[in-house]
Amino acid sequence: MSLIKRFLGLSKTERYGMWVLLVLVCLYLFSSLVLGSSGNNDESYDFSEYKNEILSWEQAVAESDSLRQQYYLSLDNPSRSSTQSKLKPFDFDPNELSREQWLEMGLNEGQVKSILKFRSKGGVFKSKADFKKMYVISDEEFSIMEPFILLPDTYVKKQNTEWDPDPVEEKVSIEINSADTAALQKVKGIGPVFATRIVRYREKLGGFVDVQQLTEVKGIDSTNFNSIAAQVYVNPYAIRKVRVNEANINELSAHPYISYNIALSLINYRKQHGRFEVLTDIKNSLLVTDEVYEKISPYLTVR
């Protein structure tokens, strides 16, 4: 009778395994009798490849049976805890039980609400270890429920061994003399703040003649520039130039490269010697050195 009780106490999966094992044993005995009676004793069959699987299955059944036996014995123990008295576990998948089934098992409303909330947000129990992480389930409750959970002990994520090429990034090429702030933000490394500063500085300059001038924008250091430079270019013909023969001192000194003193020097030279015939004539002004000329000449015209 004890064997029958133990058999009936097994889960559906375990009972199915017992039947499979029984069929294999019967087939083995039958084949032994048939082969033995045929007189062909030289040929032998090796069932060792199934040995490990059978032993593993028997061990798992024994462990589960032991835990179940301990639980059922505890039901007759008058000193069992209140948790043991409250819980009435049965085989279950924590991903599928309804509210009523959780309550039937012995969990309270708060515990059931937390589990269902976890599942409603897309949570999935992939192993017994996952279910144990629920803070509303105590260690004692989990130890009682564990033999009945129809999940593996742990979950190991399969590694993808297939080659996964890096996504191809879309190449960006922005002309910075015509781009607005939205277009500039397509450049990796330029956010809203840098985009606004670039446009403002461009307006003061009259345009960029070289990408390197971006380093003159506040906040763009060599590190930022190196990541930005390959994504932008300049159209040197889009420069807004100042007419050096007509501009007053305020118009000249408004340019970032022309100081008030340089502007005054140009105005004084123009008053004394007349119009600049060619742009190189501005080098005759006392403060316009070769270095200054190289910097300001792209932004001036004598026309």
Image (cartoon, rainbow, N blue to C red):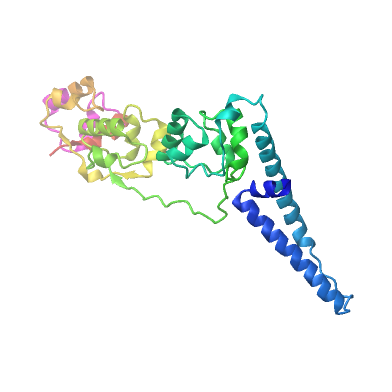
Quarter of the rendering containing residue 298:
top left
Q: Residue at x 72, y 56 (%)?
A: 53
Report the magenta residues as a range: 266-290
Above/below status of 196 relative to 155: above
* In magenta segment, residue 86: no
**Is 246 placed left or right of 178 in the picture?**
left
Above/below status of 19 relative to 4: below
Q: Residue at x 49, y 54 (%)?
A: 165
Quarter of the rendering containing residue 122:
top left
**Is 110 placed left or right of 204 in the picture?**
right
* Percent position of residue 63, x then y: 71, 43
Give the tally of numbered discs: 0
Closer to the camera in the image, 1 or 174: 1
Closer to the camera in the image, 27 or 40: 27
* Percent position of residue 29, x then y: 80, 67
Main SS of the magenta part reads: helix
Quarter of the rendering containing residue 121:
top left
* Percent position of residue 111, x then y: 47, 30
Closer to the camera in the image, 88 or 265: 88
**Residue at the farthest top position:** 261
* In magenta segment, residue 287: yes
Q: Residue at x 74, y 55 (%)?
A: 54
Above/below status of 273 relative to 21: above
* Percent position of residue 4, x then y: 69, 50
Above/below status of 3 relative to 256: below
Closer to the camera in the image, 12 or 55: 12
The C terminus lies in quadrant = top left
